[in-house]
Image: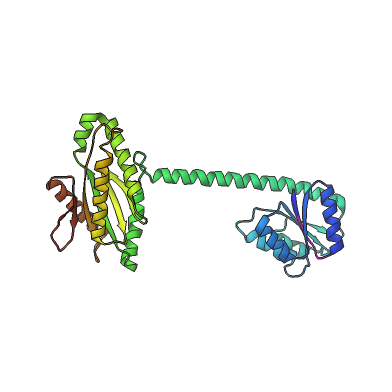
């Protein structure tokens, strides 16, 4: 084990270090509590053998700091002390000390404590590894629950969680945002012609293209079926329209390749969040602009300007 010795008695500190090395342990010895604290923050330790009374931090104060620090893996803490009365022992235990030995330390007792320390330390490491594995598994499950499996974009659950906070920042701090709704033109005919596998391949390709074309701060979701919703943040409605148009052209170009059974196009409607509106109203205006794009002949982007006449973006 890696053992940190903290004691301001030079002779005792060196004797302990040589003794613990003879037991087969790796030892670092420091002369005060502050030096011990700095070592633990930087390197950690399996076991701390500390004097109670030291310059700077006492042994009990050192233990309290260690137990309160979330990044220091649990070290078994043995306190060396001339204090043997019950109140002092209870004070040390409440601070997080695992065991105590009266000075001068009996060598057999010290070795026995270290045997216990090794077992306890092993259990703590197993618990730590199990917790990390569970956290990683939970993170994967959470990501899977919030991601559309086919396109790799956020799903409706993620959208329902993200939109209120996005709209809340707009209301409270004026962080503007635009909504773009994109729909694959003639998707039913595409499915009928190339089968559901062909349709799935197209949706997956669109998910990849949309994700690659997003700019920093923008978000994309599969809104349902062949429809996608983009949150284009901190930009003008004109910029959002140009972004949707860039994506429309990119999709038309990419899907014309031989890796898909057939080419496809997008239509899109874009709306800017306006003061006093709800999220649903912004999405509704983007949806209305999308329908107008479809009615105008598809394969185009229409901006809802609220007070100005909608115009295709080209």
For this rendering, which residue is in front, 39 or 172?
Answer: 39
Residue drawn at x 78%, y 64% is: 31
Q: Is residue 106 toward the left or the right of residue 250 in the image?
A: right
Query: Residue 104, image x and y in percent?
Result: 87, 59
> Is residue 226 visible to us here?
no
Q: Is residue 214 left or right of residue 293?
A: right
Q: Nearer the viewer, residue 3 or 119?
A: 3
Q: Does residue 125 show up magenta in the picture?
A: no
Residue 214 in the image, given as x and y percentages of width and height: 33, 51
Q: In this rendering, is residue 195 above or below 134?
A: above
Give the camera-side residue of 228 and 250.
250
Q: Position of residue 212 (x, y in %)?
A: 35, 47
Q: Choose between 17 and 58: the one closer to the eye.
A: 17
Image quadrant where residue 185 sits: top left
Question: In this rendering, does residue 76 appear at all?
Answer: yes
Image position of 107 (left or right of 190): right
Instruction: Say which residue appears at 18% left-offset and 45% top-offset.
Output: 299
Q: Main secondary structure of the magenta part?
A: strand
| The quarter of the displayed image where residue 227 is located | top left
Position in image of residue 66 (x %, y %)? 66, 60
Residue span colored magenta = 4-8
Residue 36, quarter of the rendered image: bottom right
State the scheme by which the image is colored: rainbow
- Is residue 3 positioned above or below 224 on the image? below
Query: Farthest residue toward the bottom?
Result: 56
């Amino acid at each position: 084990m890696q053992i940190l010795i903290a004691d301001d008695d030079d002779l005792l500190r060196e004797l302990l270090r040589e003794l613990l090395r003879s037991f087969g342990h790796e030892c670092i010895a420091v002369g005060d509590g502050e030096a011990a604290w700095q070592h633990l923050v930087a390197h950690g330790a399996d076991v701390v053998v500390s004097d109670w009374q030291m310059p700077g931090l006492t042994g009990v104060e050192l233990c309290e700091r260690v137990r309160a620090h979330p990044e220091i893996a649990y070290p078994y803490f043995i306190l060396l002390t001339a204090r043997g009365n019950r109140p002092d022992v209870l004070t040390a235990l409440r601070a997080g000390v695992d065991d105590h030995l009266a000075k001068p330390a009996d060598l057999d007792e010290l070795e026995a404590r270290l045997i216990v320390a090794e077992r306890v330390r092993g259990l703590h490491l197993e618990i730590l590894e199990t917790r990390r594995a569970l956290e990683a598994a939970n993170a994967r499950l959470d990501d899977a629950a919030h991601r559309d499996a086919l396109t790799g974009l956020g799903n409706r659950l993620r959208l329902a969680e993200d939109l209120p906070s996005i709209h809340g920042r707009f209301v409270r701090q004026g962080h503007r945002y635009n909504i773009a709704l994109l729909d694959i033109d003639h998707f039913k005919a595409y499915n009928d012609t190339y089968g559901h596998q062909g349709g799935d391949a197209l949706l997956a390709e669109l998910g990849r293209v949309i994700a690659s074309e997003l700019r920093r701060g923008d978000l994309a979701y599969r809104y349902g079926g062949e429809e996608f919703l983009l949150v284009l943040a901190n930009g003008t409605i004109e910029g959002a329209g140009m972004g949707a148009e860039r994506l429309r052209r990119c999709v038309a170009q990419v899907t014309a390749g031989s890796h898909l059974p057939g080419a496809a196009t997008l239509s899109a409607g874009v709306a800017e969040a306006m003061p006093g509106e709800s999220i649903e109203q912004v999405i509704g205006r983007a949806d209305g602009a999308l329908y107008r794009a479809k009615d105008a002949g598809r394969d185009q982007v229409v901006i809802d300007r609220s007070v100005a006449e909608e115009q295709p973006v080209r």
